[in-house]
Amino acid sequence: MEPYAIFLAVITFGAAIVNGALGYGFSSLTVPLALLFLANRVLNPALVPIEVALNAYVLWVNRDALPNVWRRMLPIVIGLLPGVLLGTTIVTQVSPAWLKLGTYFVLLPLILLQAAGFRRPIRSERSIGFLFGGGVGVLYSVTTISGPPLAVMLSNQGFTKRDFRASLGFIRLAESSFTAVAYGYAGLFTHESMALIPMILPSIAIGVPIGAYLIQHIRPETFRRVCMSFDAWVVAFGISTLLREVRFVDGWAAFSVLLAVIVIDAWMLYRFFHIHAPRIAAEEAHATALRAAEARVFASASTFAVSVQKPAIE
């Protein structure tokens, strides 16, 4: 067994719990940590076939909502294909250290945007969809990560929880399937990559059901926010480490990136738990009270209707 096998199993177990809870997040958590001891061109081909299965499962579970969203998501799916081809070329050509650094630099602002709860609805959804799909295709094929930008995009457009998950499953199944074909054509499915899959599968089989159970007892927004915070710190640590490795910044000055992210994220955590979390709790309590009131009115109306009909029946 390779020395990193236990670490990879632990990392993917935690990531699988997040994926089971939110419907995404497996790669978003696995990749930043696993890149600390693996190269993209080794790690990515192991994750992509697993992601095909995971995304197919998410789409199947939410298949009832697919007719509501697939037409809106089609421009993004069409845009994925050229992006995946470009991203696969980048993986095969760019040196591992610089590819890791580029991956981290792209991920960090996306994670912080999602952690900040960024919302800005897009009116020209169809025309933006092709361009957005191309960007997501490049990002996914280079990093196997697309959850943060997709979550921001879909949240902006006001999807319901069910439609959100169906849209996510539809897009991510398409991108992972396209990437699997492109990786196969480029010869990236090596023995070294395939040997990682048996280390990962048991973690997913156990972690996904646990996540699905946990999310029923934890507010999804709080759970997502804590996960994004952890992810931001990991990515910042990866950037700081690689800045030293490629000798772009010498000494401890490289860890100024990590320090800056810790300060920014701590401020956003404070705002979330002192401003947004209480507001979300109040909104949920209000919605629960409304549903209870509606149920009581319906029950009273049903009882009244039965009492009125009884003499006529008799």
Image (cartoon, rainbow, N blue to C red):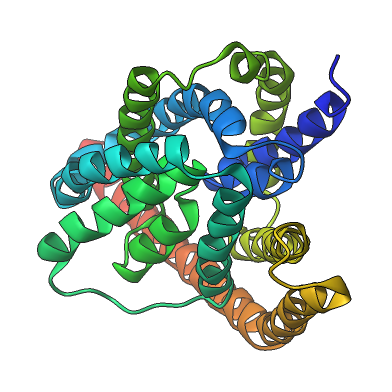
Q: Quadrant of the N terminus?
A: top right
Q: Is residue 130 visible?
A: yes
Q: Residue furthest front?
A: 247
Q: Is residue 301 above or below residue 199?
A: below
What residue is shown at x 67% (from left), y 50% (from top)? 32
Kindly indicate the quadrant of the structure image that contains residue 3. top right
Q: Compare residues 35 and 29 and report the one nearer the observer.
A: 35
What residue is shown at x 57% (from left), y 42% (from top)? 27
Q: Is residue 213 visible?
A: no
Instruction: Locate residue 197, reporting x and y percent.
Output: 64, 18
Instruction: Locate residue 194, reporting x and y percent.
Output: 60, 14
- Image-based side of 148 in relation to 5, left or right: left
Q: Is residue 37 above or below residue 307?
A: above
Q: Quadrant of the C terminus?
A: top left
- Image-based side of 190 in relation to 63, left or right: right
Instruction: Locate residue 23, reporting x and y percent.
Output: 51, 43
What residue is shown at x 86% (from left), y 27% (from top)? 6
Kindly indicate the quadrant of the structure image that contains residue 203. top right
- Image-based side of 266 in relation to 197, left or right: right
Instruction: Locate residue 285, reporting x and y percent.
Output: 59, 73
What residue is shown at x 32% (from left), y 60% (from top)? 159
Q: Compare residues 120 and 209 and report the one nearer the observer.
A: 120
